[in-house]
Image (spheres, helix red, strand yellow):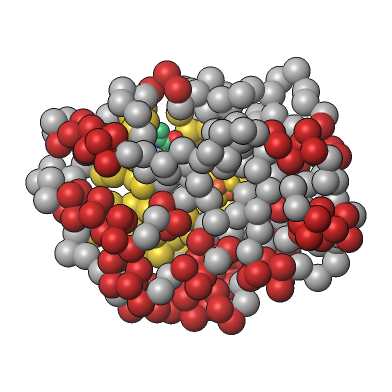
């Protein structure tokens, strides 16, 4: 840890503990620095990135591989859990590192070990798995963050995926448009302009993360014909109020970004201070339903610990076989 980072973290009330920082990578961008207003205790952006003592508390239920990716890895860089789609992780590097990350044990440089970027032959082997598995209809580039690759390297992967007939849809999951929009250069925008359907799912948790650079970046991506979606993690003290999420989702829809998933936090080590209960999450979703345009409501999702997959945690509006409650809580009969 260099002195500049250490001073910065401490000036925001965070922890620059060596053991903590060598276990979980620390990195932020100038965009993030510019949108942080106060400190790690009270700022919803600082709390996502600035290391905190609370991370040293690892609870018994927390897991090194919280969503069980390891068991579904047929070849390095691929996670094949669902029949029709795979994750393809070309690098475990990110533009910034989020303190609540569910892959925090896997992403970023670790003490003494460099970050892991797939070699050309490993990328070829992963592509071969996709080529020879005709059930794969969609490829989801994730990581790490695929938009930290150079436009040329990302372009080579996208070219190869476009050439595979049974792959009809390409999806990219990225924090870059929010955390470091300057990486979406003209060359990167050009690389994303494709014939096949390409969906970019941006990871964002709070409206404070949207500044003019982010707005301009999303506008230029949109012009390429890429479809924009978002995913957020429900985080205690950061976005665990219906008004906070409503403001975020409205801002996204107004920018042409459809909120896709709101993830219940995973059991990643040292993240219990970010978690709330499923019942609390469902209360928040209930408060949004009906009061917020359907376009602005994502599906509330849980990735079941251990690797059984994702399921929606949508609150239930049906009681018994025929009693339905409306969003205001009034009962009605159907049928
Ligand atoms: C989350 C995830 C996906 C994508 O799931 P969707 O519900 O289609 O967004 C695909 N594969 C794995 C292994 C995942 O964890
Ligand atoms: S950008 Fe995504 S993968 Fe990278 S640290 Fe944040 S949550 Fe984890």
Instruction: Residue 190: give x, y in percent of width and height.
Output: 28, 72
x 49%, y 33%: residue: 311
Instruction: Residue 307: give x, y in percent of width and height.
Output: 48, 23
Any part of residue 261 in sight: no
Asked where in the image residue 139 lies, by quadrant, the reply is top left
Report whether 224 appears left or right of 253. left
Report whether 165 appears left or right of 306. left
Tell which of 323 and 105 is nearer to you.
105
Q: Is residue 211 above or below residue 88?
A: below
Q: Is residue 177 above or below residue 286?
A: below
Any part of residue 110 in sight: yes
x 37%, y 60%: residue: 150
Instruction: Residue 151: give x, y in percent of width and height.
Output: 33, 63
Instruction: Residue 176: give x, y in percent of width and height.
Output: 51, 61
Asked where in the image residue 143 lies, by quadrant, the reply is top left
Q: Is residue 164 above or below residue 207?
A: above
x 50%, y 46%: residue: 93
Report whether 329 appears left or right of 73. right
Report whether 222 appears left or right of 253. left
x 35%, y 29%: residue: 76
Tell which of 71 and 205 is nearer to you.
71
Asked where in the image residue 275 lies, by quadrant, the reply is top right
User: Which quarter of the rendering shows the C terminus?
Assistant: top left
Q: Is residue 268 above or below residue 92?
A: above
Count of all numbered marks drawn on residues in the image: 0
């Amino acid at each position: 840890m260099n002195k500049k980072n250490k001073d910065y973290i401490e000036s925001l009330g965070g922890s620059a503990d060596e053991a903590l920082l060598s276990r979980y990578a620390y990195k932020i961008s100038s965009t993030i620095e510019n949108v942080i207003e106060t400190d790690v205790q009270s700022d919803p952006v600082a709390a996502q990135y600035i290391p905190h003592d609370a991370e040293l508390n690892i609870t018994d239920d927390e897991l090194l591989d919280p969503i069980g990716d390891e068991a579904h890895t047929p070849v390095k860089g691929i996670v094949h859990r669902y029949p029709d789609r795979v994750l393809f992780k070309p690098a475990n590097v990110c533009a910034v590192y989020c303190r609540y990350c569910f892959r925090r044990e896997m992403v970023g440089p670790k003490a003494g070990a460099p970050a892991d970027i797939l070699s050309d032959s490993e990328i070829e082997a992963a592509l071969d798995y996709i080529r020879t598995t005709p059930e794969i209809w969609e490829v989801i580039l994730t990581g790490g963050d695929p938009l930290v690759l150079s436009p040329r390297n990302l372009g080579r992967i996208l070219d190869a995926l476009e050439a595979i007939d049974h792959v009809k849809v390409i999806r990219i999951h990225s924090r870059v448009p929010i955390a470091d929009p300057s990486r979406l250069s003209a060359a990167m925008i050009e690389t994303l302009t494709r014939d096949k359907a390409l969906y970019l799912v941006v990871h964002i948790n709070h409206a404070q993360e949207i500044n003019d650079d982010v707005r301009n970046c999303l506008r230029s991506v949109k012009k390429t014909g890429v479809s924009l979606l978002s995913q957020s993690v429900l985080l205690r003290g950061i976005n665990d109020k219906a008004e906070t999420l409503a403001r975020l989702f409205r801002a996204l829809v107004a920018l042409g970004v459809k909120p896709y998933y709101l993830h219940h936090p995973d059991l990643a080590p040292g993240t219990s201070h970010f978690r709330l209960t499923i019942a609390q999450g469902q209360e928040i979703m209930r408060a949004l339903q009906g009061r917020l345009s359907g376009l602005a409501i994502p599906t509330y999702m849980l990735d079941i610990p251990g690797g059984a997959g994702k399921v929606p945690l949508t609150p239930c509006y049906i009681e018994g076989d025929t009693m339905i409650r409306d969003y205001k809580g009034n009962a009605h009969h159907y049928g």
